[in-house]
Image (cartoon, rainbow, N blue to C red):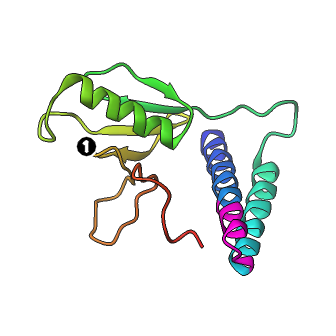
Amino acid sequence: MPEQRVLLVALLLDLQSDARDRAARSWASRKAMIAAYWSAVAVYSGHLARCLGERRGRRPRARFELVQEGFPDLVVEGWEAASTTYSVRREECGLGARDFPRGTVKLGGIAIAHVSYNGRIWPLHEWEPNITPIYDNRGPSRDSG
């Protein structure tokens, strides 16, 4: 159970960071209501993360890892680094989509997402036409506010 708690704390802190970025972009675009929403999401996700985190000393940080068959596992700093590392490996080996193995992103040793051939990061469940990637390496999404 403690590993799920660490995973949940890490995901809440990731949500907090993403929400802060979206709030800043919304304020810059003069979209006050959307900015206020994302600011509240950032605050509450941070509070929840602190409530679930370890109380004594510094809490252990879950590590993002990129795991891929035929390659060494690498610790990465987050979604963007996992996507970039996967894409660099793909370009260096020159294999096509059929032959290049899909990557898995693990957080604290628990698989949480997979990386497709194009470098986008998706939830673990099966792909569906309307699913949104967790991380899209094409740039910032246009629906952020």
- Magenta residues, as a range? 22-32
Residue 67 position, x and y percent, is 38, 30
What amino acid is found at the position of numbered circle 1 in the picture?
Tyr
Q: Nearer the viewer, residue 97 or 75?
A: 97
Q: Nearer the viewer, residue 86 or 125?
A: 86
Mark 1 lies on residue = 117
Residue 22 position, x and y percent, is 64, 62
Quarter holding residue 3: top right
Quarter holding residue 145: bottom right
Above or below 52: residue 45: below
Residue 82 position, x and y percent, is 45, 36
Task: Please check the rendered image and state whether residue 136 is part of the magenta-colored stretch, yes or no.
Answer: no
Q: Residue furthest front?
A: 29
**Number of labelled discs?**
1
Q: Residue furthest top?
A: 72
Residue 137 position, x and y percent, is 41, 48
Q: Helix or strand or loop: what does disc 1 sit on?
A: loop
Q: Residue furthest right?
A: 56
